[in-house]
Amino acid sequence: MDPEARVNIRIGMTIQVLTLSGAAMMASNPGAAQDAVPTSNGWLDAQELGASGSQFESKAATTDGSNRIAIENVGDFKAGQGVTISKCNIQCTTRLYGPGDPYGPGGAARDAKDAVEIRGYDGTAGGWLVYILEIDGANPTTFRWSDNLVRGNQWRGTRVPVAADWQKLSNGIEVKLGKRDWQPGEFVSFTARDQRLTTIEKIEGNTLVLKHPANRTVVDAVVRHSDTAALQAAIDRAIRERKNLSIPAGYYRLRSSLLVRNPEGLLIEGADGVNTVLDISEGAGACFSLQGGTEVTIRNVRLLGHTGMEEQAGYFTSSSGFSFWACALKPCNGVGIGGTERVLVENVHASRMASECFISGGPYRKGQEEPAKYTKSLTFLRCSVTDCAANAFNNCDFAESTSILYCRVDGAGWHMYEGSGRFIKIVGNYIRNAGPITIGDIPHNLPRTGLRHLEDLGAGQAVVTDNVLEGIGRCGGIAINHGPTQVIVANNLFINYNGTAINASSNTVHWSFPPQNIIITGNIIDLTCTDDKPRWRSGISVSTSDTTVSDNQVYVRGACAPNVTGLRIGESAQNLNIHDNLVRNCSTGLSAHRLEGRVVKVTDPSRFTVEGIPYPWRYSGFYKGWNLVWLGEGKPRIPCLADVFDNDTLEFRLAQPCEGMQPGDKFNLYPPAANWQIHGNTITGCQTPVLLDAHGSPTSRVRDNLISRGEATGVKQAVDVRGQFDLTGNHISGFDEPGAVALSLGPDNLGRAWPNLIRDNVFQRCTATVREARPGLWQTCVAQRNVFLDSPEPPAPAPPPAK
């Protein structure tokens, strides 16, 4: 999970609530909007309560120290209204972070006090600048700095010595870092703005008398309406009086979040999703920030932010090793939910949000422990997200029953959805130019020992079905990683997709667990690239245990395409069932690959910490009995037997000592029984139809598949086996080009030959049936009852030795 989510929670997020009547209506007609029926408590009108809803603006002249400004056109400005005036109020705010986790108690944002002095900002370089200065070295103390939120993950300067005097940055700005014991990983951010937010006290002809004075004389300031205070007062009154709030058609400018605090059945409704606009492009926070309460519905509004994909803020790892997403320093969101029980967001359309567009973060269940208030139902219906820099939708908590239904995402710089929520439904959406639908991504700042409640209730249980993903711009696909259990990915369409479509990955980090119990079925995946920049991509990639992949189609239109794999399988997976899939015109049809790990720290000849292998669940076997194969020259040429893996320390223990281990040593790891069933698939038109480059196991079976050359040319072999796999009942046909062979046999990476069972296969119209990487591999196999049609019959293997 991207930690940016947690930053936005701290600054206040927007909340939305699902009404029970709405849930019932969507169950019978999920595409239909609810009728707007006023409750018996009545309605309030936001404009009647002081919100202008006006886009009018005018030039004005300000005087330093004066609260009177001369305006060219008074227009529809009125006394009592909020306004912003550009260029006339030079101000800087600073915050200090680190050296610990900027999202945790060891480094969260706090008052910078005397950490930095700033001078030279006069607004001429821009009305809103954000700088970051991070200590990146000690002895001597140095810093790196950015004036564009580390866009593109690039710094303007690095290893700059900290001086006792003023130091130049850019745009005429100079800084003086305070005299203190600076630590690598500490960083200061400061925001420089020139806008005044104030209230009109009275109007005298063409003079506005303001509540606050300007601190700069300018002749070309711009005065605009600001409706934050009026809308906030209207929301507070609606909650207090148990009424609903109508926001008429209009243009409402926001400077900060609208807080929806402890609502007990509130409907906030605009006139429609086009002409009711909330614009936070000159503000920070969420348009709506829901905080606690029981039920909220927000519908029929358009939300505008200030940062699209092209202006996306960057990310960096601090010099003390912690991640930080710089959009937290200039954030804006559509709607944020903080523990509201039931939320419905309907026909809400957001664009250019710098941070997560729709985000939930609040209390959640921990096994049997249940908080007094937490999000139990969160539904987004017929919403859209367009050109947003970060996630379109985000659960950065374990909120329950998040449903994203019949929405459209066209431009999301991070994920279409990212979340560790529970009981998720992503149904019927259209997605393009977006990162992945990510099921999982457990929050990064939760310690592994603090996630034991996942073993009671799990997380990331999800149904992702009936979506259309078009390959325009970013192609993130559907990703399952870091902890989800019980996931169904079904009946999705991928059109001209230039990225991996579905990826169920067992990769973990120190705070996460491998996904499991997954069904991927009925998807139609077109990996045809229609531009001139084809990417390496797979139709379906699986390295997760307890996974079924069935009845999918993966293909490329036209000729066999390079850089494309139909089905890709990783050896960390156990209990796989891959069946009844159709793969056409991919460079590789089906491939299996090894699991590789690396030694990080050696404790003794039997114990070492590792990275690169999945860190298992506590109820797993902790790799006991798995085989470890050392890689590289001078390493043992026989497998070592794993004894146990410590889930807290991430330490591996071998059954027998292995002398000479060093940090950086690499190894393969594979189970004693993989339990793979690969059967009933059709693979045709592929340059490398089947590649089994994994160790395999006695329970790795490849059976009853149809493998044909189709229209592919230059195919060297149909099936390439480099491990322990039984091949039974397969039909291999048409590999009749010069030098082609039906079955290629090679030893594993320890040089071992396996007595694979090769039985009841049909070899038809093949130039050669068997090719050995070295003599004797075929003789080691157990070959029985194979049929050779227009194909040469290889010598019969030697009979197995008598007992």
Image: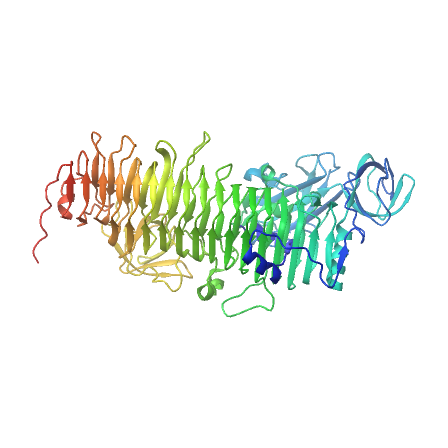
Above or below for 49 versus 454? above
Where in the figure is residue 281, as x and y percent of width and height?
A: 69, 43
Most extreme residue toward the bottom is 368
The answer to which image quadrant residue 204 occupies is top right
Q: How many marks?
A: 0
Is residue 204 rendered to the left or right of residue 280? right
- Residue 165 is at least partly visible in this image: no
Instruction: Indicate the position of residue 415 as horizontal and vertical percent values.
Output: 52, 46
Asked if residue 504 lies left or right of residue 132, the reply is: left
Residue furthest to the left = 802
Residue 433 horizontal side relative to residue 521, left or right: right
Q: Residue 470 or 256: which is nearer the viewer?
A: 470
Choose between 295 and 313: the one closer to the eye. 295
Q: Residue furthest right?
A: 204
Instruction: Examine the rendering and report whether any part of residue 401 can be seen.
Output: yes
Where on the picture, by quarter, is residue 559? top left
Q: In this view, does 127 lie above or below 32?
A: above
Residue 271 position in % (x across, y down): 71, 48
Instruction: Examine the image and state in which quarter residue 771 appears.
Output: top left
Q: Which quadrant of the figure contains the C terminus? A: bottom left
Q: Which of 399 and 133 is in front in this view?
A: 399
